[in-house]
Amino acid sequence: MEAFFAEWVHTYGYFILFVWCILEGETALIAAGLFAHTGDMNLGLAISIGALGDL
């Protein structure tokens, strides 16, 4: 299950982040920060997509 979730984040992570920021921005950015810390997301790109989703 964990491997499936990790692969899902690698494939659709930024799109999910964008949609999640539209719905609940603060929680999405905390999760994106955790994924950036583990190396699953690029921090700069996650911040940019989060800002676009917040507009």
Image (cartoon, rainbow, N blue to C red):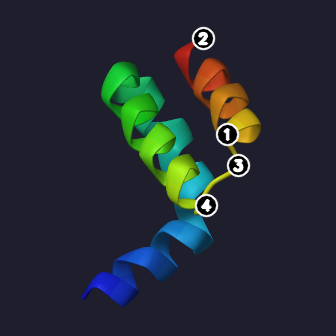
For the residues labelled 4 and 3, the Cα–Cα distance comes to 7 Å
Residue under the point 49% across and 53% down = 35
Q: Amino acid at mark 3?
A: Asn
Question: Mark 3 highlights which residue?
Answer: 42
Question: Which label is found at residue 55?
Answer: 2
For the residues labelled 2 and 3, the Cα–Cα distance comes to 20 Å
Question: Which label is found at residue 43?
Answer: 1
Q: Nearer the viewer, residue 19 or 14?
A: 14
Give the answer, above or below, for where 22 lies relative to 19.
above
The picture places residue 12, in percent across and down from the top left corner, at 56, 65
For the residues labelled 1 and 3, the Cα–Cα distance comes to 4 Å
Q: Nearer the viewer, residue 47 or 17?
A: 47
Question: Mark 4 highlights which residue?
Answer: 39
Q: Mark 3 packing: few (<14 Cα in 10 Å), some, or many (20+)?
A: some
Residue under the point 67% across and 22% down = 52
Q: Are marks 2 and 1 in contact (CB under 8 Å)?
A: no
Q: Are marks 1 and 4 in contact (CB under 8 Å)?
A: no
Judged left or right of residue 53, residue 44 is: right
Q: In what quadrant of the picture does the N terminus appear?
A: bottom left
In what element is the residue under mark 1?
Answer: helix
In what element is the residue under mark 4?
Answer: loop
The picture places residue 27, in percent across and down from the top left corner, at 31, 29
Q: How many numbered callouts?
A: 4
In what element is the residue under mark 2?
Answer: loop
Q: Amino acid at mark 2?
A: Leu
Q: In what quadrant of the picture does the C terminus appear?
A: top right
Select label 4 or label 3 by which is in front.
Answer: 4
Judged left or right of residue 5, residue 37 is: right
Outermost residue on the left side: it is: 1
The picture places residue 19, in percent across and down from the top left corner, at 48, 39
